[in-house]
Image (spheres, grey):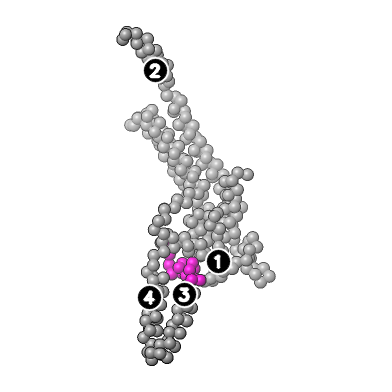
Amino acid sequence: MDDDKHFEELKEKEIKRLTSPIIHQNGKDLDIEGNPVPQYRDGKYILEPNPTLLSTDEILKYAPFSDEASRVRLTRGEYGINDIWNVYQSEIFVLFVSGILILFFSAIISFLFFKTFNLTLILLILLIIIFLYIFFIHDYSDKNRKIEKNISNNDELLLLFESKEENAREIIEKRFPAPQLTNLKFNGVLNNCREVVESQIEILNTLTPTEKTKPEIESRKKLIKQVISKVDDLTNELILSEENDLNEVIGEMDDLINSIKEYN
């Protein structure tokens, strides 16, 4: 089994785990693989995805309520308060507890030594500013993040078709310049091929890989590859049907070589 196929199988298994109902067994909440589900939040069981198997778009699609999805949204700058809390809840909790303790002891010290709570009030205002900064002011998006191209196997097929299509159109334009009817006919066929491939890619990107949909997905991919192969065949035939000018060039070179003595 090649690495790409093995990776696709692992990805399908992970998507199935994330999209399957939770199993309640012996008082425990388990996923379909028997792993404990540690989080239950906002009335939902939260399954954490494996980021090494899924793209960021797939994480948002199949595990939108996970902490990993919150990290993706933070990086993209598309986050809310819940995302900040999900990712940094431990740090925020420690800060909150520390702030309360500091306020408590500062109130005691201020009252015992200064008979005033001014210091405590200043610290309270500072703590409020810190929390406002954490939740509303600080920008968590990654400024240096390159725009990620989550190219799936389906999108790779589309890119392959587009490259073959471009080659074919260049040869057609060279052999049958517009506005020849042959040019219109050939480009019309390629237009139909593009529409079919794009519609099938859209369907494949919408389908969730399962045991039920897997045969249909493979069948559609196979048909797309056949269309790509036919476009490739068309390009090859057009190239091979061009006139062979090599003999003429060789003859011209022989004439030139023979005529060198005339310049002595």
The residue wearing badge 2 is 249
Secondary structure of the residue carrying tag 1 is strand
Disc ID at residue 129: 4
Q: In the image shown, does 225 or 6 lie closer to the viewer?
A: 6
Dominant secondary structure of the magenta stretch?
A: helix
- Mark 4: which amino acid? Ile
- Mark 1: which amino acid? Ile
- Label 3 vs label 2: CA separation? 82 Å
Q: In the image shown, does 110 or 16 lie closer to the viewer?
A: 110
Vertical relation: 14 (above or below) 242: below
Q: Mark 1 vs mark 3: which is more N-terminal?
A: 1
Disc ID at residue 142: none
Q: Mark 2 vs mark 1: which is more N-terminal?
A: 1
Q: Does the segment drawn in magenta span residue 163?
A: no
The residue wearing badge 1 is 46
The residue wearing badge 3 is 95
- Mark 3: which amino acid? Leu
Pick out the residue farthest to the front: 113
- Label 1 vs label 3: CA separation? 25 Å
The residue positioned 42% from the left and 24% from the top of the image is: 242
The residue positioned 48% from the left and 71% from the top of the image is: 91
- Label 2 vs label 1: CA separation? 72 Å
Question: Mark 1: few, some, or many residues within 10 Å (few <14, many ≥20)?
Answer: some
The residue positioned 41% from the left and 39% from the top of the image is: 191
For the magenta stretch, what is the residue range? 78-91
**The C terminus is located in which quarter?**
top left
